[in-house]
Amino acid sequence: DFNPNAFCYDMPAVMNLACVTFGMTMAEALVASTINAASALCVADECGSLEVGKRGDCIVLDAPKWEHIVYNMRPRIAEVFK
């Protein structure tokens, strides 16, 4: 439910809240914020996962594991590919 007066641009914080508040695993939070979000918008055949032929941006984080998106909430972005 999107409330235009209370939006959030910080996906790592949203993923952290999903894990802490709703008991989701980090993998579930990642899937919810990528392919499931694309599916909810009816664009999962175009984006939402890293597959040949799909469009999207990719970031490389300066972190030992992808889970640090949720742990750290603001890992340093090393590189962006568009």
Image: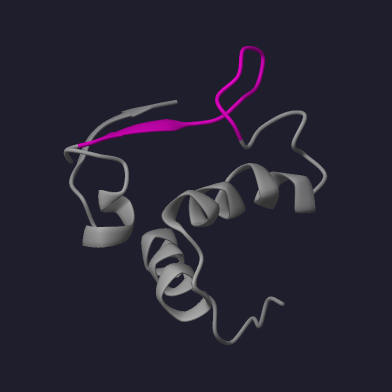
Residue plotted at (77% across, 29% down):
45
Nearer to me, 13 or 66: 66
Q: Position of residue 9 (x, y in %)?
A: 45, 65
Query: Quick one: which residue is furthest to the right in this view?
Result: 42
Nearer to me, 37 or 81: 37
Relative to 63, is 33 on the left or the right?
right
In this view of the protein, can residue 13 be seen by the observer? yes
The residues colored magenta run: 49-61
Q: Position of residue 53 (x, y in %)?
A: 66, 14
Magenta region, mostly helix, strand or loop?
Answer: loop
State which quarter of the image contains the C terminus: top left
Relative to 78, is 45 on the left or the right?
right
Quadrant of residue 2 within the rendered picture: bottom right
Position of residue 39 relative to residue 28, above or below, is above
Relative to 21, is 74 on the left or the right?
left
Relative to 56, is 61 on the left or the right?
left
Q: Position of residue 8 (x, y in %)?
A: 48, 72
State which quarter of the image contains the N terminus: bottom right
Tell whether position 60 is magenta: yes
Residue plotted at (44% across, 63% down):
15
Q: Position of residue 46 (x, y in %)?
A: 73, 29
- For the image, the number of numbered tags is 0
Residue plotted at (55% across, 85% down):
6
Position of residue 6 relative to residue 19, above or below, is below
Residue plotted at (66% across, 32% down):
47
Tell whether position 29 is magenta: no
Position of residue 20 relative to residue 68, above or below, is below
In this view of the protein, can residue 73 be seen by the observer? no
